[in-house]
Amino acid sequence: MTVPYTDGDAPLIPRPELTLPALRQAVATVAPSRLPEFFEDLQRAFVRAGDEDSVVPIRMFHRQWGVVVEIERYPETARRLHAAEQAVNSPDPEMRDRAIREAGDIVRAAHREVAGG
């Protein structure tokens, strides 16, 4: 398994709280191009929460974007994930398999960090 964060991969910002204002600010800082996606997902989460009469979709939104920020706040980790996402389209099956493992390792590590270790 690959190491999710390398020694030289210092975070750009501290890990934000899983609140709407903190996540919005973090996304604006580490992945500003994703703000439209953030707001679309937010709107869908609130609609779904109303439809289901549940806060679970909002909690899922916070967790999802907490993971995005966890990855993007480490520039080298984000670069590795984006490279793996591109390599998934490779015609070489070995390269695709490595890319899938790399992306999975990074995302699972970010989920663990967001969940508290």
Image (tube, rainbow, N blue to C red):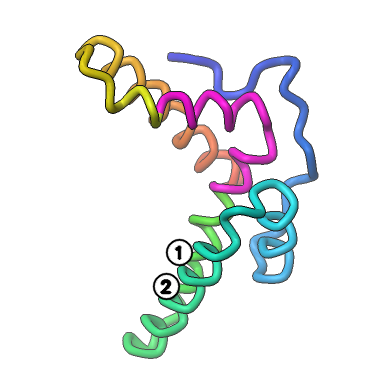
Q: Which percent across, then down, holds residue 31?
A: 64, 49
Compared with residue 16, is residue 38 higher up or lower down, i.e. above or below?
A: below
Q: Quadrant of residue 22?
A: bottom right
Q: Which percent across, then down, holds residue 57?
A: 42, 72
Is residue 21 shown left or right of residue 95? Answer: right
Question: Can you identify the residue that label 2 sits on?
Answer: 57
Question: Can you identify the residue that label 1 sits on?
Answer: 60
Q: Quadrant of residue 1?
A: top left
Task: Give the residues in magenta.
Answer: 68-84
Closer to us: 44 or 114: 44
Is residue 101 shown left or right of residue 37? Answer: left
Residue, x 56% and y 55% (percent of image)?
34
**Secondary structure that dominates the magenta span:** helix
Amino acid at circle 1? Met
Is residue 20 shown left or right of residue 37? Answer: right
**Mark 1 touches mark 2? (CB < 8 Å):** yes
Amino acid at circle 2? Pro
Compared with residue 90, is residue 59 higher up or lower down, i.e. above or below?
A: below
Mark 1 to mark 2: distance in Å?
5 Å
Secondary-structure class at tag 1: helix
Residue, x 54% and y 47% (percent of image)?
67
Crowd class of label 1 (few under 14; some 14 to 19; many from 20; radius 10 Å):
few
Compared with residue 21, is residue 104 higher up or lower down, i.e. above or below?
A: above
Residue, x 74% and y 61% (percent of image)?
25
